Image: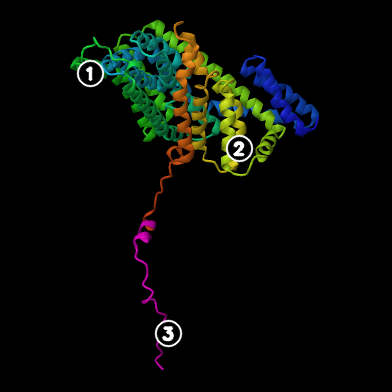
Amino acid sequence: MSPEVIAPVMFGTLVLVLLAGFPVAFSLAAVAAAFGIVGVLGGQFTAPFLLAMPLRVQGILNSDNFLAVPMFVLMGLVLERTGIAADTLMALGRLFRKRPGGLLVATLIVGSMLSAITGFVSASVIAMGLIALPTMLKAGYDPKLATGSIAAAGTLAQMLPPSLVLIVLADQVEVPLVDIFHAALLPSAMLVGLYLTYIVAVTQWRPSLAPPLADAPNASLNTWREAAAAAGAPLLLILSILASIFFGVATPIEGGAVGVCAALLIGLAKHRLSRQRLAEALTNTGVLCSSVIFMLLGASFFTLVFRGFDGQIWIEQLFGRLPQGQLPFLLFVCTGVFLLGFFLDFFEIAFIVVPLITPVARKLGVDMVWFTVMVAVVLQTSFMHPPFGIALYNLRSVAPSTVRTSDIYLGAIPFLLLQMVMVGILVAFPGIASTPPPAVTLTDQQVEDALRPPPDPELDVHTEPISNK
């Protein structure tokens, strides 16, 4: 078999193995090992070439981006297990229940907060489906509007800092995590604003879709205090962590560690942090981080062998058949990632697809920070698309039987259109999610040269020396 054929055959074999239902991490490692033997026996590379794998493992474990993953995961699980999200939703629900769509506004606010805390679409959607959906259905809310808002709020976990998705993408694309958080903050806020604007407009136009509670008392001072106490602590925690990272006070790892300590203190202050809940949070953190490590190791081994067969050249040749320029490449990548999101989990896309397309994007001069945020937004859109969206599957698993599957699909469409609008905004105005310009430090001499006025050309006259002859 010629070397030009081995790389596409290796990639096709991996696709078939994944479609057969084998675990992703072990599929990557097994395919890499099998084709590694083929490469050594066929003379494509020598056996010492494979010894670079231990160095890659060491590089993964020493990655600053990856070391932040356990901290943020544990912080989110501690706050989720202690019932902070449920308390916040109930408090904000009592605050807005006299307004049409008040519970929807509370759901989006709490869902955004929970998404930022947990960093997982499935966890956010399932939690909000169990907490908010029964309350809204009991209040007479339209099932389509209720389920759509929950799915939209849950998918914000893809891009709302400090998101696990952004951490993993930053590590795969090899860009600073601080730049990714900085670039994703404004698009995330804009998307939340689009959601809230749509909900307020629809409920004002048709209040019957989300009627106010007629027997609910007006919000009193105690109600405001309860809402501030319930939502203030987790929101202050998230904003403090992001501010410390943005302004260079703490690294992402340090910010995550401080977040874990603060989450533990909040749980203790609310008398919710029992030994069993803490053990569950620690166990789930260990299981999740272990699975991520194994997938990352398998993907690294696969990438090593794939590049040994000059697979990156094959990928570049595939993209070389597209029209020249960044826009055709980005359209192809966004469409491909969008379709893959129907069938593959985020980690599979991040560990398999993203490393293959990153070198091509760099060669085309694409801003990698903007590219990372764009991939996160496209994946978020894919997870909301009926009938394959993962968020919709998760919501269907916890929704009451009175809610039809068609209601979930129809309710997701308006929010899906808003996400597509956000994709268009990022394409039209890439500056809102680009790398911030580097700070320029001038020396004292450079400052003096800049302030010195330019010479007057009229005074700059060449004169001959006067002779005393």
Mark toward the start of the polypeptide (1 vs 3): 1
**Spatial CA span between label 2 and label 3:** 62 Å
The C terminus: image quadrant: bottom left
Q: Please tell me which residue lies in front, 172 or 213.
A: 213
Question: Whole-Å distance between the Cαs marked 2 and 1?
Answer: 52 Å
- Horizontal and vertical percent for residue 239? 34, 27
Labels 2 and 3: the sequence-earlier one: 2
User: Relative to the observer, which residue lies in front, 440 or 389?
Assistant: 389
Residue 373 located within the stretch drawn in magenta: no
Who's the residue at 49% across and 22% down the image?
A: 384
Q: Which residue is mark 2?
A: 359
The segment highlighted magenta reads 446-469
Q: Name the residue type under label 2.
A: Pro
- Res 59 quadrant in image: top right
* Percent position of residue 147, x then y: 43, 15
The residue shown at (70%, 25%) is 12
| As drawn, 387 above or below 180 | above
219 horizontally vs 372: left or right? left
Tell which of 219 and 460 is nearer to you: 219
Classed neighbour count for the residue bearing mark 3: other residues with Cα under 10 Å, few (<14), some (14–19), many (≥20): few
Residue 464: say if magenta: yes
Q: Which residue is mark 1?
A: 224
Q: Main secondary structure of the magenta part?
A: loop
Q: Is residue 381 visible?
A: yes
Where is mark 3, residue-wise?
Answer: 464
Q: Quadrant of residue 460?
A: bottom left
Q: Secondary structure at mark 2?
A: helix
Sequence-wise, which precedes: disc 2 or disc 1?
1
| Discs 2/1, front | 1
Q: Is residue 286 above or below residue 372?
A: above
Residue type highlighted by circle 1: Trp
Q: Residues within 10 Å of mark 2 (few under 14, many from 20)?
A: some
